[in-house]
Image (cartoon, helix red, strand yellow):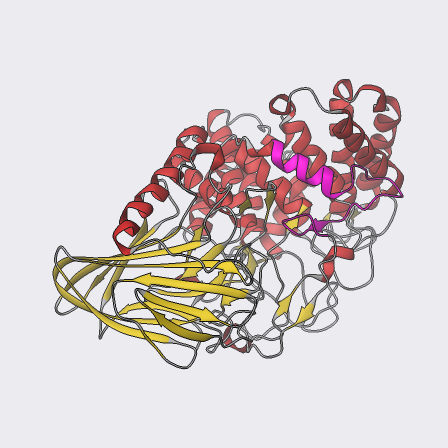
Amino acid sequence: MSTPIAAYGMLADGNSAALVDRRGSVDWLCMPRYDSPALFARLLDPGGGHFALTPVGAFDVRRRYLPGSLVIETEFTTATGVARLRDALAVGEGECGHTVGLRPPHELLREVEGIAGEVDFDIELVPRPEYGLVRPLLRETGRGVRTFGGPNQIAVGTAVPLRAGRACARARARVSAGQHVALAMVWTPAGEAPPEPTPPERVSGRIRETVEAWRSWEADHDIYQGPHHEQVRFSSRVLKGLTYRPTGAIVAAPTTSLPETVGGERNWDYRYAWIRDASLTLEALYLGACPDEATDFVSFMTSAAGGAADDTSSLQIMYGVGGAHDLSERELPHLRGWRDSRPVRAGNAAWSQTQLDVYGELLNALHLYRERLGELHPEIQRFAADLANAAARRWREADAGMWEMRGQPRHHLSSKVLCWVALDRAVKLAPRLGRYARTSAWAAERDRVRGAVLWEGWSRRRGAYTQAFGSDQLDAAALLMPLYGFLPATDPRMLATIDAIAGELTDTGLVLRYEAQDQHNADGLSGREGAFVLCSYWLVSALAHAGRTGQAARLFDRVTGYANDLGLLAEEVDPRTGELLGNFPQAFSHVGLVGAAAALDRAAAAPSSSPPSASEE
């Protein structure tokens, strides 16, 4: 059986991420970027490689993030003693505040400290670059081991004698009260000078520097002071940990192919920058952290799209974190998958889909950050205008929808609503768009979109706004209508839609994305999936907007309660067992938490009215 997804914690350095479980095993690590081939992939296959630092025999575990950081401290209690393990992906020396993640050393730092008695640890290093395909040669050095072979060089430094065998290295170390055992593993590409890991005597200090670097970022960005302060602050930190600092790209999740249902085929690679996910992340950070990174993201999206969104442009729904366009999907048949959920995929075929919602999500983020962005550069003025023109020109088209359906294109309600958002925000941005503004034309087309949605998006049979024009199927994306200001939540039809979703598109009270059958689903795939965490938070926000604060607060507490012991949320939840499913940690889920917390706060402050969201400001 694979390790439960909830057993993992995320380490991040602003370039890449690692997952470490409660036993002290790093089972997922991609270097030097989130989307690089994994060095350790036991997350997806028992033979995929790992780096374990685990107590011998039975033990109890408590763990936490060191306050204000993404450094994990795990306390092990055995029959003979107590020891603490601290794990970090190091930030660059001297990095702090906005510079965190700019030039990390691509180094994993691990230190065990004896607290009481003595504890024996087994150390096991099993590097398997390229998703487990490469079995590198390991050689012992004076203070550790090095790998030879494949496209990577890995060096591990420690004072503990590591014994190198066939593509693995092992040791046993005893830690008594007051003693420390430190290890550092550093990566560099083949062809460069062999890497030098941090000496063992400096590991403790470098971990402290990494903690302080994260705290300095949080101190500069800690703006939310509502009753859910700790949850919002932590979610904001997680979202920062999913940001590729060199370009400003924001990944949807740091993992690939963690399934949406055990044994199912909905196993996708999320290590890329979706316009939708990243734009919604910026909205959440606006509420919870007010990031300077907004400028970086806008610059990244403008340049990745070639500065235009017209018929001749290269605007896609997603890009690689470095701006790559070709994200061709392939299967990795040598990996069994988490709990034998195949296929395991690298790349994502959705990059070539048509999804019309992206115009609205990106323009809403631009509008939200209009003051922070200052005087818009002419390239950004033109890009914003192109987005609005594209929405005006294309909103009548069918598309794959925001859920990236792999079936036939449809006239998805959410895509039409987001085209309305694009035109609405463009009208509001027009005074800042100079000669590119087409205010009257955008306003006129905006009203046409609204009329079409109100007329064709409503299902009389279902008594609700549904997934697509002419459809009777419910879709949680209809909850975006009040959140983006298309309709007030108190509108009778909107209230009916909220009630329909709450009553008919839920499983044990948790919201599903859309109605699914065992066969012939609208997404072109068979089987079902778990409850979608973001959609459950959307229902919280919609209920709060409708003034149903008690119901909203109860659902917020329930959904947030599915976070693991570190506070991390996955993409989905199995509503019957409560188990976390899907890629992890998921930006969407933490975005939803921040937005729902803010909606609850506004509703509590003004219970007699339907308060605006950050998306409407």
Give x and y (percent) for residue 502: 58, 50
- Give me the residue at 55% from left, 74% from top: 337
Q: Main secondary structure of the magenta part?
A: loop
Could you say which quadrant of the image residue 474 lies in? bottom right
**In the rendered view, does 315 fall on the left or right side of 599?**
right
Q: Name, please, the residue furthest toward the left.
A: 117
Quarter holding the C terminus? top right
**In the rendered view, does 203 fall on the left or right side of 456?**
left
Give x and y (percent) for residue 468: 78, 52
Could you say which quadrant of the image residue 302 lies in? top right
- Give me the residue at 69% from left, 50% from top: 319
Total numbered badges shown on the rendered structure = 0
Q: Name, please, the residue furthest toward the bottom.
A: 166
Q: Is residue 41 above or below residue 374?
A: below
Closer to the camera in the image, 227 or 390? 390
Closer to the camera in the image, 343 or 152? 152
| Residues in magenta, as a range | 295-324
Q: Is residue 75 above or below residue 341?
A: above
**In the rendered view, does 394 fall on the left or right side of 326?**
right
**In the rendered view, does 167 fall on the left or right side of 350?**
left
Give x and y (percent) for residue 537: 54, 46
Closer to the camera in the image, 475 or 246? 246
Quarter holding the N terminus? bottom left
Q: Is residue 156 visible?
A: yes
Q: Is residue 71 magenta?
A: no
Could you say which quadrant of the image residue 243 lies in? top right
Q: Is residue 317 magenta?
A: yes
Q: Is residue 579 visible?
A: no
- Give me the residue at 47% from left, 31% from top: 601
